[in-house]
Image (tube, rainbow, N blue to C red):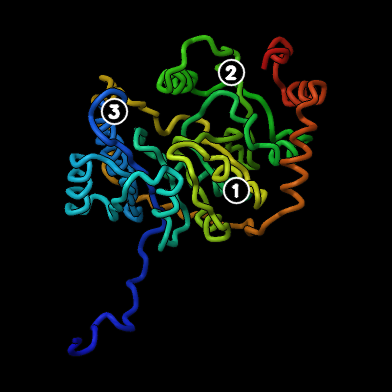
Amino acid sequence: MRIGKNPQKFQFVKENKYNHLILIPIYIPHNKGYYLESFEILQYCLESLIKTIHSKTFIAVVNNGSCTEVIQYLNNLLNDKLIHEAIHTFNIGKINSIIKGLAGHDFDLVTISDADIFFQNNWQKETVKVFNEFPKTGVVGIIPQLKMFSYCCENILFDKFWSNHLKFVNVLNPKGIKHFCRSIGWDDSYNKNYLKKHLIIESKNGFRALLGTGHAVSTYRFEIFKKINFKTNDYKLGGEIELDQSSLKFDTWRLTTEDNYAYHMGNTKEVWMHKEIRNLNTSSKDTLKVNYVYKLERKKLAYFFKYRIFRKILKNPYIYRFLLKKKGLPIQFIKHF
């Protein structure tokens, strides 16, 4: 039987002092084969994250069926108050792990990251700058990649088709892009013109960001997930298209910082990781806040026209080449870009 009243009843939850959620799904089932060095990669990931975040950051990890060694490591971080939440489950898949990690939270921003990302100094500060400089931004990446404007950026291309603020410029950090290509196992046969020019959007203040973003690490307006009925996924890995399109349904933009503020490590440790970890700052007190101006509302007509119709229009080679030329891509690049 019960004696007395539960002291928690009708007690308010303490005011949320955090404004940025970092969510990392983790799957390291053993330390053999493909996963031989994954545990050490995870340690670099979390150590680099902990060293580079500001004081209003909440770190949540979802252990998606990992081995005992990983479970103990995550529990130790939680006990030492270096992370704020550790969810342990069987292998329910990456997308379902993300859904589980989002539940019960309410922040301004959420960064969804793979467990093999090496975070760099000032990545949060630069991310917030992109959101504030471009009010329609819904997602911000911090790892520039090849030709990102060709994926889920039709709404930006439509909005700024005639604008001089959308243009091709010289790649700021080609070494960073080369590093990413190598980290995902690509050989050296990709189009090298992508290392010379990329498409940027420029704000009225002259601040620049790249069009598009990848899957490895991206920061979202948290409100997107509050307004969308995000469905469970049947795949253990993959199926990110719904995650990508979630921001498009509100006609928001997918952008990336012009410079590298994180690196993809893959599944193999390298000498540079040990050197870089020593160059990171301790947690910053810089807690820049996002000033949301653009109201999030479902834009069904805009989504249909810009993503469905305009996407098909851009597949016309004459219109596509006209766009590339108008945005300043050198003529010698246009045929193979």
Between circles 3 and 2, the one closer to the viewer is 3
Instruction: Classify the position of the N terminus by image quarter.
Output: bottom left
Could you classify mark 3 by the number of other residues whose Cα lies within 10 Å: few (under 14), some (14-19), or many (20 or more)?
some
Q: What residue is shown at x 42% (from left), y 18% (from top)?
A: 185
Q: CA distance from mark 3 to mark 2?
A: 31 Å
User: Is disc 3 in contact with disc 2, using a CB cutoff of under 8 Å?
Assistant: no
Foreground pick, 274 / 83: 83
Between circles 3 and 1, the one closer to the viewer is 3
Secondary structure under tag 1 reads helix
Q: Earlier in the sequence, mark 3 or mark 1?
A: 3
Q: Amino acid at mark 3?
A: Tyr
Residue under numbered circle 2: 194
Secondary structure under tag 3 reads helix
Name the side, left or right, on which 291 lies relative to 322.
Answer: left
Q: Earlier in the sequence, mark 1 or mark 2?
A: 2
Could you classify mark 1 by the number of other residues whose Cα lies within 10 Å: few (under 14), some (14-19), or many (20 or more)?
many
Q: Amino acid at mark 1?
A: Ser
Across and down, in percent, residue 202 comes to 63, 36
Residue under numbered circle 1: 247
Q: What residue is shown at x 49% (from left), y 51% (from top)?
A: 232
Q: Quadrant of residue 107?
A: bottom left
Across and down, in percent, residue 75 comes to 20, 50
| Tag shown at residue 35 | 3
Could you tell me how many numbered marks the image carries?
Answer: 3
Q: CA distance from mark 3 to mark 1?
A: 32 Å
